[in-house]
Image (tube, rainbow, N blue to C red):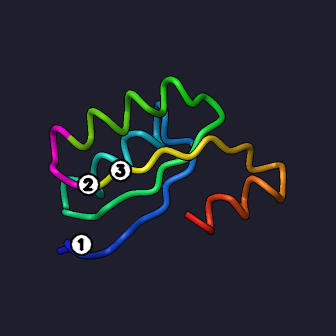
Amino acid sequence: MLRGKTAVVTAASRGIGKGIARVLAREGANLVIASRDLERLSRTASEIRSEFGVEAIPVQADLTKRADVAKIAET
């Protein structure tokens, strides 16, 4: 359903954001996932890649900072 599409998910290192990222990946979407916690986010990206076979790019970002929001968009 979402194969070939790319989704951006914020707060994706845990909780609801991580759950949303997993559902999108299960549906075939490639992901750009963002969070302030890069270590946890990198683990999440690795889990998603191996479990669902999609691309998952982790981006450390604080959405209260414009430069970080731009960094997500550039990815």
Q: Which residues are magenta?
A: 50-54
Query: In the structure shown, which secondary structural element does the residue marked by tag 2 occupy?
Result: helix
Between the C-alphas of marks 1 and 3, the distance is 14 Å
**Amino acid under disc 2:** Ala
Which residue does the numbered mark 1 point to in the structure image?
Answer: 2
Query: In the structure shown, which secondary structural element does the residue marked by tag 3 occupy?
Result: strand
Between the C-alphas of marks 1 and 2, the distance is 8 Å
Left or right of residue 2, residue 7 in this image: right
Which residue does the numbered mark 3 point to in the structure image?
Answer: 56
Q: Position of residue 64 (x, y in %)?
A: 82, 49
Q: Is residue 5 magenta?
A: no
Which residue does the numbered mark 2 point to in the structure image?
Answer: 25
In front: mark 2 or mark 3?
3
Q: Are marks 2 and 3 in contact (CB under 8 Å)?
A: yes
Q: Residues within 10 Å of mark 2 (few under 14, many from 20)?
A: many
In which quadrant is the C terminus drawn? Answer: bottom right
First along the sequence among labels 1 and 3: 1
First along the sequence among labels 2 and 3: 2
Residue name at image x 62 percent, y 59 percent: 72
